[in-house]
Each structure stands twice: as C-alpha cells, then as structure tokens.
Amino acid sequence: MSRPGYASLDVLLKEVRACRVCAPHLPLGPRPIVRVGADARILIVGQAPGTRVHETGIPWNDASGDRLRQWLGVDAATFVDTSQFAIIPMGFCYPGRGKSGDNPPRPECAPLWLDRLLAELPSIALTLLVGQYAQRHFLGARRKPTLTETVRAWKDYAPDFIPLPHPSPRNQPWFRQHPWFEDEVLPMLRERVGRLLRHGPAQPG
Ligand code: SF4
C-alpha cells in the first residue's frame, strides 16, 4: 500500500501529465516533463524542456544535462534516481523557439503547479536554481542586479538555495569569462550534493 505522501503525489502527477492549459501556445503540444519522488533531498529547478527532452521525455537529456551532471559530480543513474533528485522546470512543456533561442517557460505553469508539487516534497534540503527564471521565482527581491552577481553571491542564499547559470553550451563564453565559478562555486556545489546523496540501490525514475 502507498504511504499517504506517495499516493497524493501520484494523484498530483497524473493531473500534471494531463495538463493542457497552454496547449494553443505550444508548437509541439503539451508534454510536461517533471521527475519527482516524495523522498528526494535535492531539487533542481530549471527553465523549460528543449526539443530533445520533449522527444525523449527525459529531463536534462541533452548537452546541458551532461554539463549539469558534471557540475554536480553525479552519474546519469544517480541523476534520475527520484529518491535523490526532484527535477522540476519553471515551465513543464517545450515552449517553442524565438529569435534568440528557446522561448521563456510558459508563465501559466509555475503558478498552477509549482507550490502544489513542492508541498509534496517534504525532504528537500537543497534547491538548485538553474538560470534566471528559477532565481527570479525563488529569490525574488533577494536577487542581485545580474545573474552573474547572483551566482557569485551564493553565500547569501545558503543553505537552502544555490543559484547557477544555465549549463547550456551557448554559455561557454560565460564559463570562460568567470573562472571563479569553476574554482569556487563548483567545489562547494559538489560537496553539498555529495553530503545529501543517499548511498544505496538507486530508485527508478
Ligand atoms: S507548460 Fe505547464 S501549464 Fe502549460 S500545458 Fe504544460 S504543464 Fe500545463
């Protein structure tokens, strides 16, 4: 028999997967990509799925995900273990493409679903805020004027949050221009993640 927390999370996930609220705005149609387990200890909040993630249904199943796993110091099996990581973007469905890359996450999504999902994740001890949309939502007025300053001020948001740049290959120039990120932030990130990981057989995602 499911524990109460698991049962209510299952019901909520079924609701999420059936969501079509912004279908008219989604060029590939609704396909919410969320991966959570009631026991997860680390929450990753990203932007929105790209086309490869939309096609496969697997979050961060792309070059950005490869870099994110390298940053975290975890392999692919650990990353999809829902007793370790909850993976929730600010917009759950692929939002289409604009002139300068993928569109922002659909604005309808977070107000509808985010707080309800977070209420079902009582064990989260660390939230990784990947990119400006997650940082805006979770840090609000505590954000610095730029993403770079926000990431550099990571100590201001400890221990609950770590703000990160998006690991997209498009951000290579940013990584090169800000070596303190690799020297200072990534070792701290790996250390925090390593301490929160449970060691035992992986749970399927
Ligand atoms: S982006 Fe969010 S609100 Fe829009 S259809 Fe997908 S799950 Fe629903």
Image (spheres, grey):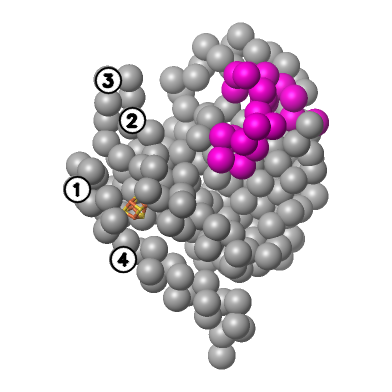
Q: Relative to the observer, which residue lies in front, 22 or 54?
A: 22
- Which is more foreground, mark 1 or mark 4? 1
What kind of residue is marked 3? Answer: Lys
Query: Label 1, label 3: how many angstroms apart (C-alpha)?
Result: 20 Å
Query: Label 1, label 4: how many angstroms apart (C-alpha)?
Result: 15 Å
Magenta span: helix, strand or loop, mainly? helix
Disc 3 within 8 angstroms of ligand 1 (CB): no
Q: Secondary structure at mark 1?
A: helix
Which residue shows up at 40% across the image and 50% down it? 109
Query: Label 3, label 4: how many angstroms apart (C-alpha)?
Result: 30 Å
Please give the residue where the numbered disc 3 appears in the rendered image: 99
Residue 18 disc label: 4
Q: Secondary structure at mark 3?
A: loop
Query: Label 2, label 3: how many angstroms apart (C-alpha)?
Result: 8 Å
Ranked by sequence position, the earlier of labels 1 and 3 is 1
Which residue shows up at 39% across the image and 71% down it? 14
